[in-house]
Amino acid sequence: MSETLLQTDGLTKRFGALTANDEITLGVDRGEIRGLIGPNGSGKTTFFNSLTGFYTPDEGTVTFDGTDITGWESHRIAREGVGRTFQIAAPFGNMTVRQNMLAVQTPKSVDEHERAQEILEFLDIDHIADDDASGMSGGQKKLLGLGRVLMLDPECILLDEPTAGVNPALADRILEHLRELNDRGTTFMIIEHDMDVLKQIVDTVSVLDQGRHIVQGTFEEVSTDDRVREAYLGSADDDEVPV
Ligand SMILES: Nc1ncnc2c1ncn2[C@@H]1O[C@H](COP(=O)(O)OP(=O)(O)OP(=O)(O)O)[C@@H](O)[C@H]1O
C-alpha cells in the first residue's frame, strides 16, 4: 500500500471576499510525481504558498511525513524537507551562479561547497558556475532555482511551471533531471500548463477549479473527465483544455 508523504485537509486561503483555496483535501504519496492543473486563477500558486509557509492558511492543516507543519515559517518548512521553486526564477543578479547556490543556508553538518559543486554538475551548469547569474538564459535560471532547492536535500519538491518559457531542448533536460531525482526517491508536485510536458512525467494529476479540488486521477482519467473540460471551457483558456 502506498504511503502519504504530504497531506492537506480542508486547506483554505481567503483574500478578502475571494476564497482562493476552498477546503482543499489532497494527499501526495511518497515517491510519486503529482501534477497540479487548473485554469488561470484556480488557486494553484496560492496552494503552493499556503503549503510552504509563504501564506498562512485561514483554515485546514498541512501534514508532512506525519508532522503537522500548518502555519510554520517557510524556512522551517524547507528545512523539514519540502522545497519549492517559483514561476519566475529570479537569482541574485550581482552574484555568480555558485554564490547563489552557497547563499542557501544549509545545516552545519553539510559541506556546502562540495554539495553545490555536485548539484551544479548534476544539472550540467557547472561550466558557468563562476559567471554572473544575471547572464543566464531563462532555462538556466530555472535550473539554478532547482539547484538552490536541492542544496537542502528535500524529500519533496513543489515546482511552479518548471519548463515554462524554456527552449524545448533544455525543457527535455529539465524533465530528465526531475525523473532522475524521482528515481532516487524525491517526491514531486508540479504545476504545469503544458499538457504535453505533463503527460510525459506525472503519475497522477489533481485539478483545481475556482479554489476547489475537483478531480484526481491518472492523466488519461483527468483529461477525459467532463468536470475538467467544463472547468477549462468556462475559463478564458480554451486552448489549454487537456485532451
Ligand atoms: N496576494 C494576493 N492577494 C489577493 N488576491 C490574490 C493573491 N494571490 C492570488 N490572488 C487571487 O487568488 C486567485 C488564485 O490565484 P493563483 O495565483 O493562486 O491562481 P493560479 O491557479 O496559480 O493561476 P495561474 O495559472 O494564472 O498562475 C486569483 O483570483 C488571484 O487573483
Image (tube, helix red, strand yellow):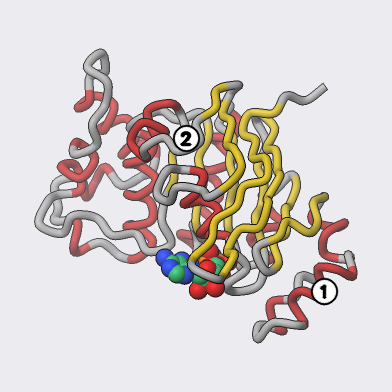
Residue 240 seen by the camera: yes
The residue that disc 1 covers is 229
Which residue position is annotated with label 2? 82
Left or right of 15? Residue 29 is: right
- Per the rendering, the mark at residue 73 is none
Q: Residue furthest front?
A: 17
What quarter of the picture does the C terminus occupy? Answer: bottom right
The picture places residue 131, in percent across and down from the top left corner, at 14, 53
Q: What element carries label 2?
A: strand
- Residue 86 to residue 38: above or below: above
Q: Please give the name of the residue rendered at 14% of the width and 46% of the height, measured from the top-left corner.
A: 130
- The image position of residue 125, as x and y in percent, is 30, 47
- Which residue is painted at 25% across and 61% down in the image? 136
Q: How crowded is mark 1: few (under 14 residues within 10 Å), some or many (20 or more)?
A: some
Q: Which residue is drawn at 61% across and 42% down?
A: 60
Report x, y in % for residue 77.
42, 33
Kind of residue at disc 2: Val
